[in-house]
Amino acid sequence: DTAVSQTPKYLVTQMGNDKSIKCEQNLGHDTMYWYKQDSKKFLKIMFSYNNKELIINETVPNRFSPKSPDKAHLNLHINSLELGDSAVYFCASTIRTGGGYEQYFGPGTRLTVT
Amino acid sequence: AQKITQTQPGMFVQEKEAVTLDCTYDTSDPSYGLFWYKQPSSGEMIFLIYQGSYDQQNATEGRYSLNFQKARKSANLVISASQLGDSAMYFCAMNFPGSARQLTFGSGTQLTVLP
């Protein structure tokens, strides 16, 4: 069973378009995230949601809008796409275990803006 | 501000040998968690191991162990008996309680296992 899933895996679109990436986790976690991995492989947090509530919003253009309809879903909508938005976007969720914390990532969505 | 540093952009290791991937961090918070992830060429992020700052013993998971030296602020990953499938990018990361527990990542180390 897939723990954190994202759709689509690949997304190719033109500048100026609006697109969405969906994320679902079936782990029962309370906190979910969006990370961006740039062309140099650097990973950076974009947003964090806890129980459907936004708790972290890093310096991200307001063209990016996360939406959490319920605890298991965190979608990312991007308006007016720009060339610089091309990256891999990862959804993740976290849980506290007996040994500490574990944070699991989805398979990633490779967004290419042409 | 918290910072994670991985000083080895690339590493090579012979198959069946052990390899250590370096990670140092900078924080003034006494409570934090340290993570290692593997990213193969297929792109997914695979959780490997976690170490809490108050954990007395070094974390181990199969062939992976975390060499945690708190005073030196280092959290090196040791992979024993390297396999060809270990070739991947490895990321060190940390988070903090009381926050959203989002991860701050290092720049990664590309490990290549040679046959």
Image: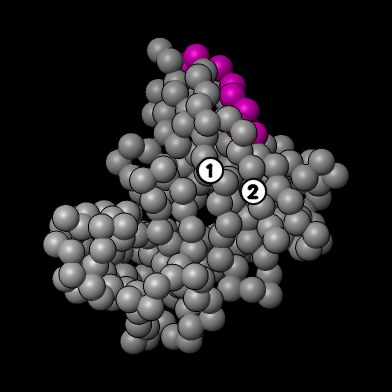
Quarter of the figure that contains the C terminus of chain A: bottom left
In the image: residue A13, left or right of residue B35: left
B110 on left or right of A5: right
Q: Position of residue B80 (x, y in %)?
A: 58, 26
Question: Which residue is label 1 attached to?
Answer: B107
Q: Which residue is mark 2?
A: B4
**Is A24 situated above or below A54?**
above
Q: Name the quadrant of the N terminus of chain A.
A: bottom left
Q: Position of residue A86 (x, y in %)?
A: 28, 55
What x and y, as percent, mark residue A102?
Answer: 55, 60
Q: Is residue A15 something one can see in this rendering?
A: yes
Using the image as rendered, state which of residue B106 and residue B41 is in the foreground: B106
| Residue bounds of the magenta highlight | B14-22
Q: CA distance from mark 2 to mark 1?
A: 8 Å
Share a chain, discs 2 and 1? yes
The amino acid type found where label 2 is placed reads: Ile
User: Dot 2: what SS?
Assistant: strand
- Circle 1: element type: loop
